[in-house]
Amino acid sequence: MPKLALTHFEAALLFALLTSVVLGIVSKKTDRERLLYGVKCFAWFFVTLVAAGWLMYFGHR
């Protein structure tokens, strides 16, 4: 079996994607609401990931 080697950023994006899918599935009733909520959650995860990265960058300067 091939070894999966992800960078920290790729692993965080994978986590955001999978978590958004699960949150979309379990928290809304219609397919449209699920899709929109999943995309919205992924966008917020991504924004938070980038913001946290910049905060850490400036925190270590």
Image (cartoon, rainbow, N blue to C red):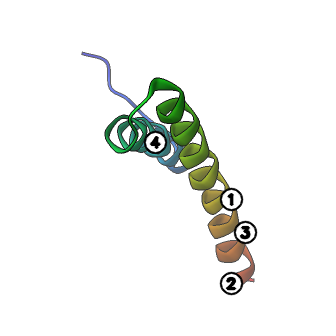
Q: CA distance from mark 4 to mark 3?
A: 22 Å
- The amino acid type, in three-letter code, at marker 2 is Gly
Secondary structure type for disc 1 = helix
Q: CA distance from mark 1 to mark 2?
A: 14 Å
Secondary structure type for disc 4 = helix
Q: Earlier in the sequence, mark 4 or mark 1?
A: 4
Whether pointer 2 and pointer 4 mark residues with C-beta atoms closer than 8 Å, the reply is no
- The residue drawn where x is 75% and y is 79% is 58
Q: Earlier in the sequence, mark 2 or mark 4?
A: 4
Whether pointer 4 and pointer 1 mark residues with C-beta atoms closer than 8 Å, the reply is no
Residue named by callout 1:
50
Secondary structure type for disc 3 = helix
Residue 40 rendering spot, x and y as whole percentages: 60, 45
Residue 1 rendering spot, x and y as whole percentages: 24, 15
Residue 59 got which mark?
Answer: 2
Among all residues in the image, which is located at the extreme left? 1
Q: Where 11 sits versus 44, above or below?
A: above
- The amino acid type, in three-letter code, at marker 1 is Val
- The residue drawn where x is 46% and y is 43% is 11
Residue 20 got which mark?
Answer: 4
Q: Label 2: few (<14), some or many (≥20) within 10 Å?
A: few
Left or right of 56, for residue 58: right
- In the rendered view of the protein, which quadrant contains the C terminus? bottom right
Q: Label 4: few (<14), some or many (≥20) within 10 Å?
A: many
Whether pointer 3 and pointer 1 mark residues with C-beta atoms closer than 8 Å, the reply is yes
- The amino acid type, in three-letter code, at marker 4 is Ser
Q: Earlier in the sequence, mark 1 or mark 2?
A: 1
- The residue drawn where x is 61% and y is 54% is 44
Q: Label 3: few (<14), some or many (≥20) within 10 Å?
A: few
Residue 33 rendering spot, x and y as whole percentages: 51, 35
Q: CA distance from mark 2 to mark 4?
A: 28 Å
